Image (cartoon, rainbow, N blue to C red):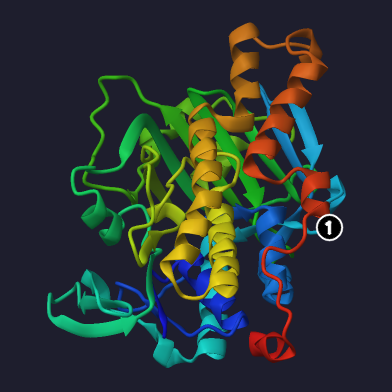
Amino acid sequence: MTVLIAGGGIGGLTLALSLHQIGVNCRVFESVPALKPLGVGINVLPHAVRELIELGLLDRLDADGVRTCELAFFSKHGKPIWSEPRGLEAGYKWPQFSIHRGKLHQLLFDTAVARLGAENILTSHHLGGWSETSDGIRADFIDKATGAPAGSHDGALLIAADGIHSAIREKLYPQEGPPLWNGRILWRGITRSDAFLTGRTMIMAGHEVLKFVCYPISNAAGADGKYDINWVAERHMPPTYQWRREDYNRTARLDEFLPWFESWQFDWLDVPGLIRDCPHAYEYPLVDRDPIEQWTFGRVTLMGDAAHPMYPIGSNGASQAILDARVLAREILAQGEVPAALEAYEAERRPATTDLVMLNRRNGPEQVMQIVEERAPDGFDVVTDVLSQQELEDIAANYKRVAGFQVEGLNARPPIVTIAAPSQMSSAG
Protein backbone atom coordinates (compact mmCIF):
# COMPACT_ATOMS: atom_id res chain seq x y z
CA MET A 1 0.00 0.00 0.00
CA THR A 2 0.93 3.65 -0.44
CA VAL A 3 1.10 6.49 2.06
CA LEU A 4 -0.78 9.51 0.69
CA ILE A 5 0.73 12.90 1.60
CA ALA A 6 -1.48 15.98 1.15
CA GLY A 7 0.89 18.91 0.75
CA GLY A 8 4.20 19.31 -1.04
CA GLY A 9 5.89 21.82 1.26
CA ILE A 10 9.00 21.31 3.37
CA GLY A 11 7.32 18.86 5.76
CA GLY A 12 5.51 16.84 3.12
CA LEU A 13 8.56 16.46 0.89
CA THR A 14 10.80 15.54 3.84
CA LEU A 15 8.29 12.85 4.78
CA ALA A 16 8.23 11.57 1.19
CA LEU A 17 12.04 11.32 1.12
CA SER A 18 12.04 9.64 4.54
CA LEU A 19 9.46 7.04 3.48
CA HIS A 20 11.40 6.37 0.29
CA GLN A 21 14.53 5.92 2.41
CA ILE A 22 12.85 3.15 4.45
CA GLY A 23 11.33 1.46 1.40
CA VAL A 24 7.71 2.60 1.84
CA ASN A 25 5.76 3.71 -1.22
CA CYS A 26 4.25 7.18 -1.04
CA ARG A 27 2.69 9.83 -3.23
CA VAL A 28 2.60 13.60 -2.70
CA PHE A 29 -0.43 15.70 -3.70
CA GLU A 30 0.00 19.46 -3.96
CA SER A 31 -2.80 21.98 -4.53
CA VAL A 32 -0.89 24.45 -6.72
CA PRO A 33 -0.27 23.78 -10.41
CA ALA A 34 3.50 24.20 -10.09
CA LEU A 35 5.84 24.24 -7.10
CA LYS A 36 7.80 27.50 -7.18
CA PRO A 37 10.67 28.65 -4.94
CA LEU A 38 8.69 31.26 -3.02
CA GLY A 39 9.24 33.02 0.30
CA VAL A 40 12.13 34.63 2.10
CA GLY A 41 14.81 33.38 4.47
CA ILE A 42 14.43 30.76 7.19
CA ASN A 43 16.74 29.00 9.62
CA VAL A 44 17.05 25.24 9.94
CA LEU A 45 18.33 24.26 13.37
CA PRO A 46 20.93 21.53 14.05
CA HIS A 47 18.40 18.89 15.14
CA ALA A 48 16.57 19.28 11.81
CA VAL A 49 19.75 19.71 9.73
CA ARG A 50 20.87 16.37 11.15
CA GLU A 51 17.80 14.76 9.60
CA LEU A 52 18.38 16.38 6.22
CA ILE A 53 22.01 15.25 6.28
CA GLU A 54 20.84 11.70 7.00
CA LEU A 55 18.75 12.03 3.83
CA GLY A 56 21.93 12.84 1.91
CA LEU A 57 21.31 16.57 1.41
CA LEU A 58 24.37 18.22 2.99
CA ASP A 59 26.04 19.18 -0.30
CA ARG A 60 22.89 20.94 -1.53
CA LEU A 61 22.46 22.74 1.78
CA ASP A 62 26.05 23.97 1.63
CA ALA A 63 25.59 25.13 -1.95
CA ASP A 64 22.38 27.02 -1.27
CA GLY A 65 22.64 28.21 2.35
CA VAL A 66 24.89 29.75 4.99
CA ARG A 67 26.26 27.89 8.01
CA THR A 68 25.06 30.19 10.78
CA CYS A 69 27.76 30.62 13.42
CA GLU A 70 26.26 33.13 15.87
CA LEU A 71 22.95 34.40 17.23
CA ALA A 72 23.15 37.87 18.78
CA PHE A 73 20.53 40.01 20.55
CA PHE A 74 20.72 43.81 20.65
CA SER A 75 18.73 46.67 22.15
CA LYS A 76 16.87 49.18 19.97
CA HIS A 77 19.99 51.35 20.27
CA GLY A 78 22.17 48.61 18.78
CA LYS A 79 23.85 47.76 22.09
CA PRO A 80 24.71 44.06 22.63
CA ILE A 81 22.55 42.09 25.08
CA TRP A 82 23.50 38.48 24.52
CA SER A 83 25.23 36.39 21.91
CA GLU A 84 25.92 32.70 21.59
CA PRO A 85 27.58 30.45 19.04
CA ARG A 86 25.36 28.37 16.80
CA GLY A 87 25.79 25.17 14.85
CA LEU A 88 29.24 23.60 14.77
CA GLU A 89 30.70 26.58 16.64
CA ALA A 90 28.37 25.82 19.56
CA GLY A 91 29.58 22.22 19.79
CA TYR A 92 26.83 20.54 17.79
CA LYS A 93 27.83 17.73 15.46
CA TRP A 94 25.65 19.33 12.79
CA PRO A 95 25.53 22.90 11.45
CA GLN A 96 22.65 25.38 11.49
CA PHE A 97 21.69 26.78 8.09
CA SER A 98 20.25 30.13 7.10
CA ILE A 99 18.71 29.62 3.67
CA HIS A 100 16.10 31.04 1.32
CA ARG A 101 12.93 29.08 1.98
CA GLY A 102 12.38 28.72 -1.76
CA LYS A 103 15.83 27.19 -2.26
CA LEU A 104 15.27 24.68 0.54
CA HIS A 105 11.88 23.81 -0.93
CA GLN A 106 13.39 23.47 -4.40
CA LEU A 107 16.19 21.15 -3.30
CA LEU A 108 13.67 18.92 -1.49
CA PHE A 109 11.39 18.93 -4.55
CA ASP A 110 14.23 18.16 -6.98
CA THR A 111 15.44 15.31 -4.77
CA ALA A 112 11.92 13.90 -4.36
CA VAL A 113 11.35 13.91 -8.13
CA ALA A 114 14.71 12.21 -8.70
CA ARG A 115 14.18 9.51 -6.06
CA LEU A 116 10.42 8.91 -6.15
CA GLY A 117 9.75 9.76 -9.78
CA ALA A 118 7.71 12.67 -11.13
CA GLU A 119 4.65 10.42 -11.31
CA ASN A 120 4.55 10.38 -7.50
CA ILE A 121 4.62 14.17 -7.06
CA LEU A 122 1.23 15.36 -8.33
CA THR A 123 0.36 19.05 -8.63
CA SER A 124 -3.11 20.61 -9.10
CA HIS A 125 -4.41 18.01 -6.64
CA HIS A 126 -6.28 19.65 -3.76
CA LEU A 127 -7.83 17.32 -1.23
CA GLY A 128 -11.62 17.40 -1.43
CA GLY A 129 -12.37 14.62 1.04
CA TRP A 130 -11.58 11.08 2.09
CA SER A 131 -13.18 7.89 3.33
CA GLU A 132 -11.84 4.78 5.02
CA THR A 133 -12.10 1.52 3.11
CA SER A 134 -11.95 -2.05 4.37
CA ASP A 135 -8.15 -2.08 4.32
CA GLY A 136 -7.07 1.53 3.89
CA ILE A 137 -8.19 4.99 2.86
CA ARG A 138 -9.44 6.64 -0.31
CA ALA A 139 -8.69 10.33 -0.94
CA ASP A 140 -10.61 12.41 -3.46
CA PHE A 141 -8.97 15.37 -5.17
CA ILE A 142 -10.02 18.39 -7.19
CA ASP A 143 -8.22 20.93 -9.33
CA LYS A 144 -8.63 23.95 -7.07
CA ALA A 145 -8.23 26.40 -9.95
CA THR A 146 -11.17 24.97 -11.91
CA GLY A 147 -13.10 22.95 -9.34
CA ALA A 148 -12.95 19.94 -11.65
CA PRO A 149 -12.42 16.44 -10.18
CA ALA A 150 -8.76 15.35 -10.22
CA GLY A 151 -9.34 11.68 -9.36
CA SER A 152 -9.28 9.43 -6.33
CA HIS A 153 -6.35 7.54 -4.88
CA ASP A 154 -6.23 4.60 -2.50
CA GLY A 155 -3.61 4.20 0.20
CA ALA A 156 -2.87 2.86 3.62
CA LEU A 157 -2.59 6.23 5.41
CA LEU A 158 -3.34 9.89 4.69
CA ILE A 159 -0.96 12.51 6.11
CA ALA A 160 -2.00 16.17 6.26
CA ALA A 161 1.06 18.25 5.43
CA ASP A 162 -1.03 21.02 3.91
CA GLY A 163 -0.05 23.94 6.11
CA ILE A 164 -1.72 26.45 8.39
CA HIS A 165 -4.83 26.53 6.15
CA SER A 166 -5.00 22.73 6.07
CA ALA A 167 -8.06 21.36 4.27
CA ILE A 168 -7.82 18.18 6.35
CA ARG A 169 -7.65 20.02 9.68
CA GLU A 170 -10.60 22.16 8.63
CA LYS A 171 -12.69 19.04 8.02
CA LEU A 172 -11.61 17.51 11.33
CA TYR A 173 -12.20 20.77 13.25
CA PRO A 174 -14.89 22.61 11.24
CA GLN A 175 -15.63 25.09 14.05
CA GLU A 176 -12.03 26.23 14.50
CA GLY A 177 -12.10 29.20 12.17
CA PRO A 178 -9.17 31.19 10.77
CA PRO A 179 -5.68 31.41 12.33
CA LEU A 180 -5.34 33.61 15.41
CA TRP A 181 -3.72 37.02 15.00
CA ASN A 182 -1.98 38.46 18.04
CA GLY A 183 -1.79 42.08 16.89
CA ARG A 184 1.69 41.86 15.38
CA ILE A 185 2.66 42.43 11.75
CA LEU A 186 5.83 41.22 10.03
CA TRP A 187 7.36 42.94 7.01
CA ARG A 188 9.91 40.73 5.29
CA GLY A 189 12.37 41.16 2.47
CA ILE A 190 15.78 40.29 0.99
CA THR A 191 18.28 43.05 0.23
CA ARG A 192 21.64 42.96 -1.52
CA SER A 193 24.01 44.47 1.03
CA ASP A 194 27.37 44.28 2.75
CA ALA A 195 28.27 41.58 5.25
CA PHE A 196 28.01 42.51 8.94
CA LEU A 197 29.57 41.24 12.17
CA THR A 198 31.02 37.75 11.52
CA GLY A 199 29.41 37.48 8.09
CA ARG A 200 27.43 34.48 9.36
CA THR A 201 25.59 36.12 12.27
CA MET A 202 21.84 36.17 12.84
CA ILE A 203 20.83 39.30 14.77
CA MET A 204 17.70 40.36 16.64
CA ALA A 205 17.33 43.95 17.82
CA GLY A 206 14.61 45.85 19.65
CA HIS A 207 11.90 44.54 21.94
CA GLU A 208 8.40 43.05 21.97
CA VAL A 209 6.67 46.06 20.39
CA LEU A 210 9.26 46.86 17.71
CA LYS A 211 11.86 44.38 16.48
CA PHE A 212 14.27 43.83 13.61
CA VAL A 213 15.86 40.52 12.62
CA CYS A 214 18.35 39.89 9.83
CA TYR A 215 20.90 37.36 8.61
CA PRO A 216 22.73 36.46 5.39
CA ILE A 217 21.32 33.71 3.17
CA SER A 218 24.03 33.67 0.49
CA ASN A 219 27.42 32.24 1.35
CA ALA A 220 29.48 34.08 -1.28
CA ALA A 221 29.53 37.67 -2.47
CA GLY A 222 28.13 38.35 -5.91
CA ALA A 223 29.79 40.35 -8.67
CA ASP A 224 28.66 43.48 -6.83
CA GLY A 225 30.58 42.38 -3.73
CA LYS A 226 27.36 42.10 -1.75
CA TYR A 227 25.32 39.33 -0.14
CA ASP A 228 21.65 38.45 0.09
CA ILE A 229 20.55 39.68 3.52
CA ASN A 230 17.20 38.42 4.76
CA TRP A 231 15.41 40.78 7.14
CA VAL A 232 12.22 40.91 9.20
CA ALA A 233 10.73 44.09 10.65
CA GLU A 234 8.01 43.55 13.25
CA ARG A 235 5.62 45.78 15.17
CA HIS A 236 2.95 45.05 17.74
CA MET A 237 0.12 47.18 16.41
CA PRO A 238 -2.18 49.29 18.61
CA PRO A 239 -5.68 47.89 19.34
CA THR A 240 -7.26 50.35 16.88
CA TYR A 241 -5.24 49.02 13.91
CA GLN A 242 -7.47 47.58 11.18
CA TRP A 243 -5.62 44.51 9.92
CA ARG A 244 -6.34 43.49 6.31
CA ARG A 245 -7.51 40.06 7.41
CA GLU A 246 -8.15 38.82 3.90
CA ASP A 247 -4.45 39.11 3.05
CA TYR A 248 -1.82 36.77 4.48
CA ASN A 249 1.01 37.66 2.11
CA ARG A 250 0.74 41.01 0.40
CA THR A 251 3.26 43.40 -1.07
CA ALA A 252 4.37 45.81 1.65
CA ARG A 253 4.38 49.59 1.47
CA LEU A 254 7.61 50.91 2.98
CA ASP A 255 5.99 54.12 4.18
CA GLU A 256 3.77 52.05 6.48
CA PHE A 257 6.67 50.82 8.60
CA LEU A 258 10.01 52.40 7.62
CA PRO A 259 9.48 55.53 9.78
CA TRP A 260 9.57 53.44 12.96
CA PHE A 261 13.11 52.25 12.08
CA GLU A 262 14.62 55.44 10.63
CA SER A 263 16.78 56.05 13.73
CA TRP A 264 18.10 52.46 13.84
CA GLN A 265 21.42 53.30 12.21
CA PHE A 266 23.97 51.35 14.21
CA ASP A 267 27.71 51.53 13.64
CA TRP A 268 27.60 47.88 12.53
CA LEU A 269 24.28 47.82 10.61
CA ASP A 270 22.15 50.33 8.69
CA VAL A 271 18.61 49.08 9.35
CA PRO A 272 16.69 51.79 7.42
CA GLY A 273 19.10 51.34 4.53
CA LEU A 274 18.34 47.62 4.32
CA ILE A 275 14.63 48.37 4.25
CA ARG A 276 14.86 51.16 1.65
CA ASP A 277 17.09 49.15 -0.69
CA CYS A 278 14.80 46.11 -0.75
CA PRO A 279 13.21 45.61 -4.20
CA HIS A 280 10.21 43.59 -2.95
CA ALA A 281 9.00 43.44 0.65
CA TYR A 282 5.99 41.51 1.91
CA GLU A 283 3.57 41.88 4.81
CA TYR A 284 2.51 38.96 6.98
CA PRO A 285 0.31 38.92 10.06
CA LEU A 286 1.89 37.00 12.94
CA VAL A 287 -0.56 34.15 13.39
CA ASP A 288 -0.77 30.69 14.91
CA ARG A 289 -3.51 28.36 16.17
CA ASP A 290 -4.40 27.02 19.58
CA PRO A 291 -3.00 23.52 20.21
CA ILE A 292 -5.56 20.76 19.66
CA GLU A 293 -6.06 17.60 21.71
CA GLN A 294 -5.92 15.11 18.84
CA TRP A 295 -4.08 14.88 15.53
CA THR A 296 -4.81 11.29 14.55
CA PHE A 297 -8.20 10.01 13.44
CA GLY A 298 -7.97 6.41 12.27
CA ARG A 299 -5.76 6.38 9.19
CA VAL A 300 -5.39 10.18 9.04
CA THR A 301 -2.98 12.41 10.95
CA LEU A 302 -1.67 15.97 10.89
CA MET A 303 1.93 17.17 10.69
CA GLY A 304 3.87 20.43 10.40
CA ASP A 305 1.83 23.63 10.27
CA ALA A 306 -1.34 21.60 9.79
CA ALA A 307 -0.75 20.16 13.27
CA HIS A 308 1.06 22.89 15.21
CA PRO A 309 1.36 26.26 13.45
CA MET A 310 3.55 28.48 15.61
CA TYR A 311 4.98 31.97 15.60
CA PRO A 312 8.29 32.22 13.68
CA ILE A 313 10.22 32.74 16.91
CA GLY A 314 13.31 30.70 17.70
CA SER A 315 13.60 29.51 14.07
CA ASN A 316 11.49 26.45 14.70
CA GLY A 317 8.67 26.24 12.15
CA ALA A 318 10.39 24.32 9.35
CA SER A 319 12.63 22.47 11.81
CA GLN A 320 9.66 21.01 13.69
CA ALA A 321 7.99 19.90 10.44
CA ILE A 322 11.19 18.05 9.51
CA LEU A 323 11.24 16.34 12.91
CA ASP A 324 7.58 15.36 12.48
CA ALA A 325 8.43 13.72 9.17
CA ARG A 326 11.29 11.71 10.61
CA VAL A 327 9.35 10.46 13.65
CA LEU A 328 6.45 9.47 11.38
CA ALA A 329 8.83 7.52 9.15
CA ARG A 330 10.38 5.80 12.18
CA GLU A 331 7.01 4.67 13.50
CA ILE A 332 5.85 3.46 10.09
CA LEU A 333 9.10 1.51 9.75
CA ALA A 334 8.62 -0.02 13.18
CA GLN A 335 4.89 -0.78 13.04
CA GLY A 336 3.87 -0.71 9.41
CA GLU A 337 1.41 1.47 7.54
CA VAL A 338 -1.25 1.20 10.23
CA PRO A 339 -3.09 3.61 12.55
CA ALA A 340 -0.95 2.49 15.50
CA ALA A 341 2.08 4.09 13.83
CA LEU A 342 0.25 7.41 13.59
CA GLU A 343 -0.83 7.19 17.22
CA ALA A 344 2.75 6.53 18.37
CA TYR A 345 4.00 9.48 16.31
CA GLU A 346 1.37 11.76 17.84
CA ALA A 347 2.14 10.57 21.37
CA GLU A 348 5.70 11.82 20.96
CA ARG A 349 5.28 14.90 18.84
CA ARG A 350 2.04 16.53 20.00
CA PRO A 351 3.12 17.25 23.62
CA ALA A 352 6.52 18.52 22.48
CA THR A 353 5.13 20.90 19.86
CA THR A 354 2.32 22.08 22.14
CA ASP A 355 4.93 23.26 24.64
CA LEU A 356 6.80 25.03 21.87
CA VAL A 357 3.72 26.80 20.49
CA MET A 358 2.96 28.17 23.95
CA LEU A 359 6.59 29.15 24.65
CA ASN A 360 6.77 31.02 21.32
CA ARG A 361 3.70 33.02 22.40
CA ARG A 362 5.83 34.19 25.31
CA ASN A 363 8.57 35.22 22.85
CA GLY A 364 10.86 32.24 23.46
CA PRO A 365 14.52 33.32 23.81
CA GLU A 366 13.65 36.79 22.49
CA GLN A 367 12.17 37.76 25.85
CA VAL A 368 15.66 38.95 26.88
CA MET A 369 15.15 41.99 24.64
CA GLN A 370 11.82 42.84 26.25
CA ILE A 371 13.23 42.51 29.76
CA VAL A 372 16.04 44.91 28.84
CA GLU A 373 13.55 47.36 27.27
CA GLU A 374 11.41 47.36 30.39
CA ARG A 375 14.35 47.82 32.75
CA ALA A 376 16.41 50.26 30.68
CA PRO A 377 14.25 51.95 28.00
CA ASP A 378 16.73 54.80 27.64
CA GLY A 379 19.71 52.52 27.12
CA PHE A 380 22.57 51.11 29.16
CA ASP A 381 26.35 50.89 29.22
CA VAL A 382 26.71 47.19 30.01
CA VAL A 383 23.83 44.76 29.78
CA THR A 384 24.67 43.05 33.07
CA ASP A 385 23.73 46.34 34.74
CA VAL A 386 20.10 45.52 33.92
CA LEU A 387 20.02 41.73 33.37
CA SER A 388 22.20 39.24 35.20
CA GLN A 389 24.38 36.72 33.40
CA GLN A 390 22.43 33.93 35.10
CA GLU A 391 19.10 35.27 33.78
CA LEU A 392 20.54 35.42 30.27
CA GLU A 393 21.83 31.87 30.41
CA ASP A 394 18.66 30.45 31.95
CA ILE A 395 16.42 31.91 29.23
CA ALA A 396 18.62 30.55 26.43
CA ALA A 397 18.95 27.11 28.06
CA ASN A 398 15.22 26.74 28.68
CA TYR A 399 14.35 27.38 25.04
CA LYS A 400 16.87 24.82 23.82
CA ARG A 401 15.41 22.30 26.24
CA VAL A 402 11.81 22.80 25.10
CA ALA A 403 12.73 22.92 21.42
CA GLY A 404 14.82 19.76 21.70
CA PHE A 405 18.22 20.99 20.62
CA GLN A 406 20.35 21.07 23.74
CA VAL A 407 23.90 20.39 22.59
CA GLU A 408 24.76 17.40 24.77
CA GLY A 409 21.35 15.81 24.42
CA LEU A 410 21.23 16.12 20.65
CA ASN A 411 24.80 14.94 20.14
CA ALA A 412 24.17 11.86 22.31
CA ARG A 413 20.77 11.01 20.86
CA PRO A 414 20.66 8.08 18.43
CA PRO A 415 19.29 8.72 14.95
CA ILE A 416 15.52 9.06 14.71
CA VAL A 417 15.39 6.77 11.69
CA THR A 418 17.67 3.74 11.82
CA ILE A 419 17.85 1.59 8.72
CA ALA A 420 19.16 -1.89 9.41
CA ALA A 421 18.61 -3.83 6.22
CA PRO A 422 21.11 -3.31 3.36
CA SER A 423 18.27 -3.47 0.82
CA GLN A 424 16.56 -0.57 2.54
CA MET A 425 19.80 1.36 2.89
CA SER A 426 20.31 1.27 -0.89
CA SER A 427 16.88 2.80 -1.49
CA ALA A 428 18.06 6.23 -0.31
CA GLY A 429 19.09 7.01 -3.88
Query: Residue 203: where, in percent of width, then height?
Result: 67, 38
Answer left or right for 99 relative to 303.
right
Local SS, label 1: loop
Q: Position of residue 149 (x, y in %)?
A: 15, 81
Q: Amino acid at mark 1?
A: Lys
Nearest the viewer among 201 and 253 is 201
Q: Quadrant of the C terminus?
A: bottom right
Residue at 27% across, 25% down: 241
Tell me, yes or no, if residue 36 can be seen here: yes
- Look at the picture and state if 334 lies above or below 154: above
Left/right placement of residue 291 relative to residue 379 reads: left
Query: What residue occupies the far front of the structure in this picture?
Result: 134
Residue toward you, 53 or 72: 53
- The one nearer the camera, 97 or 174, is 174
Residue 106 visible in the current orientation: no
| Residue 176 percent location from the top left of the image | 24, 42
Residue topped by disc 1: 93
In front of the other: 417 or 122: 417
